[in-house]
Amino acid sequence: MCRLWGALLLLGMLLSPSATSGPVNPCCSFPCQHKGVCVRTGASGYECDCTRTGYYGTDCAVPEFWTRIHDAVRPSPAFYHFILTHFRWFWDVINNTFIRDTLMRLVLTMRANLIPSPPTYNSKYGYLSWESYANLSYFTRVLPPVPTDCPTPMGTKGPSQLPDPKLVAERLLLRRTFRPAPQGTNLMFAFFAQHFTHQIFKTSGKMGHGFTRALGHGVDLGHIYGDNLERQHQLRLFRDGMLKYQIVNGEMYPPSVVDAPVHMIYPAHVPPEARLAVGQEVFGLLPGLMMFATLWLREHNRVCALLKEEHPTWDDEQLFQTARLILIGETIKIVIEDYVQHLSGYYLQLKFDPELLFGAQFQYHNRIAVEFNQLYHWHPLMPDTFRIRGEEYSYEQFIYNTSMLTDYGVEALVEAFSNQRAGQIGGVPNIHRNLLKVAIGVIEESRLLRLQSFNEYRKRFNLKPYTSFQELTGDEETALALEELYGDIDAVEFYPGMLVEKAPPRAIFGESMVEIGAPFSLKGLLGNPICSPEYWKPSTFGGETGFQLVKTTTLRSLVCRNLKATAKEGTAEEEECPYVAFWVPDTALEAESPERKEL
Ligand SMILES: *[C@@H]1O[C@H](CO)[C@@H](O)[C@H](O)[C@H]1NC(C)=O
Ligand SMILES: *[C@@H]1O[C@H](CO)[C@@H](O)[C@H](O)[C@H]1NC(C)=O
Ligand SMILES: *[C@@H]1O[C@H](CO)[C@@H](O)[C@H](O)[C@H]1NC(C)=O
């Protein structure tokens, strides 16, 4: 009997962590500063590799001479953000000079340089490896995962068990009352964001978290053409480069799965004739996504007709492939000059011009990171209800509503979404209850993937780590809630940190979302092969006509020339086009907040 107890006791000791673990892994406390690489040595030692960090010493904490000078004169991100978002008169002058190009080049290179290229780690490999480089099924990541043998999920800081994700979401992220985004950001913006990002964020259901099915790792328009060749072929007409379509009420729409048999996600009760078939399988979810899918489908077929006119000898394949490159260019143009321009609030007029980088050191290569995917969950954008032509629709009526797009037509939806405000993303709890499960999923995923803390990411992107909850949130109540949940500011998780961070006046989210998100975004856009010296020339786009389309397309021109598109005739008249933008009309804004003034 006694011996049995003894044996059980011994077994218990062997199984409990304190008995099995030797000395704590020293890399758990992330000792290496300034992007130094932590390597374990011997039984309990570590070394920091400080090569080309500009620092030296045991923990890469001592600046080299030039680093010291550079750090002393470098303004903080908050400072240049302030300059770029104020003094309109000054920027009105700059916009029209060569300084615009110089600044744009600076923005691009400074941001893109923060992203490792070629890519480094992934969710399995916290050290450089060939597998991590070569296996495209992984999302990459900028910081390695927290080692598995650390005392706490965040390394050494914070509780040994993180708070329930549901509790975190309900206390920190759940919307009480709808808070509109400043600067009038609208649903047109929200749906564009969702539509555009779903070509690059496709977490693999089969392979699991940390894996992607979007193997193009960038703007490849897989959400229009499908993420694999078989799907693309099902969606193609194989005539004149065109994609399959159907005509409803005299207008062009995506085909149904009856004509283009691809997998689409719809509730079971939706009959095949009502299931629209497009590149991305989830786009049946929202009429706003299907609206953008329809606009791009019309644009693709319109561009094919233009190309065929100029190149009557080209076969279907060449027309299709060239149209795709043109649409990739148009997309990047809209994203930089309309979408990022609006999001940034900058008075510097942004410019999509790949030639700006031709003299700089820049790798035309991109790999989508798990951190980019995490931070891009902008569900606070979504409103409480959807207003179209005087009708108000609930989520229940809007979601998977397969008739709404064709009932109203593209024009009415464009008008409705351009006139309805979207929600503020960061700095206020603003996620609709129906979408809270998405945020919970993001937090759960980040734990499975052992993402490092919010403050570690701040450091990685040259930002000062926050030293108190109050400093992070700028308000007492949220700071207290955060402290109760995490205990230690260095244990705050990546995504919740992003969303609770205080937002500067007139900004849609906090500093970290900009400083960490923008590098991923700009690297992804300019790292596209069409931006390289080898590709960036008229012949790539079928000649000067196609090249001009890439250089001049705007959100407005894309929409306006495709509103009335039918199979045969091409474009709508500019004058007939309704209000189209990523923000609600100024008049609507002024009515809401008369105190809004320009500096
Ligand atoms: C990538 O890695 C996963 C996980 O190890 C593996 O299942 C998959 O086959 C790899 N892909 C390739 C192309 O080797
Ligand atoms: C300069 O660019 C900003 C941002 O696009 C814009 O608001 C402003 O009107 C521009 N000024 C001129 C003179 O082009
Ligand atoms: C779908 O939208 C239409 C308006 O286009 C509306 O009449 C209908 O009730 C909606 N369907 C559902 C199931 O709510």
Image: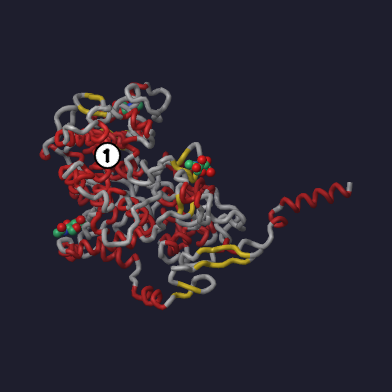
Most foreground residue, 323 or 158: 323
Most foreground residue, 150 or 302: 302
Residue type at tag 1: Arg
Residue visible at 43% across and 66% down in the picture: 464
**Which residue matches tag 1?**
324
Q: Position of residue 563 (x, y in %)?
A: 18, 34
Considering the image in quadrants, where does the C terminus appear? bottom left
What coloring was used for the rendering?
A: secondary structure
Residue 208 in sight from this viewpoint: no
- Residue that extends furthest to the front in the rendered view of this protein: 313
Most foreground residue, 418 or 309: 309
Residue 528 drawn above or below residue 40: above
Image quarter where ligand 2 lies: bottom left
Q: Position of residue 74 (x, y in %)?
A: 34, 71
Residue 483 in sight from this viewpoint: yes
What SS does tag 1 mark?
helix
Residue 88 drawn above or below residue 289: below
Residue visible at 46% across and 39% down in the picture: 204
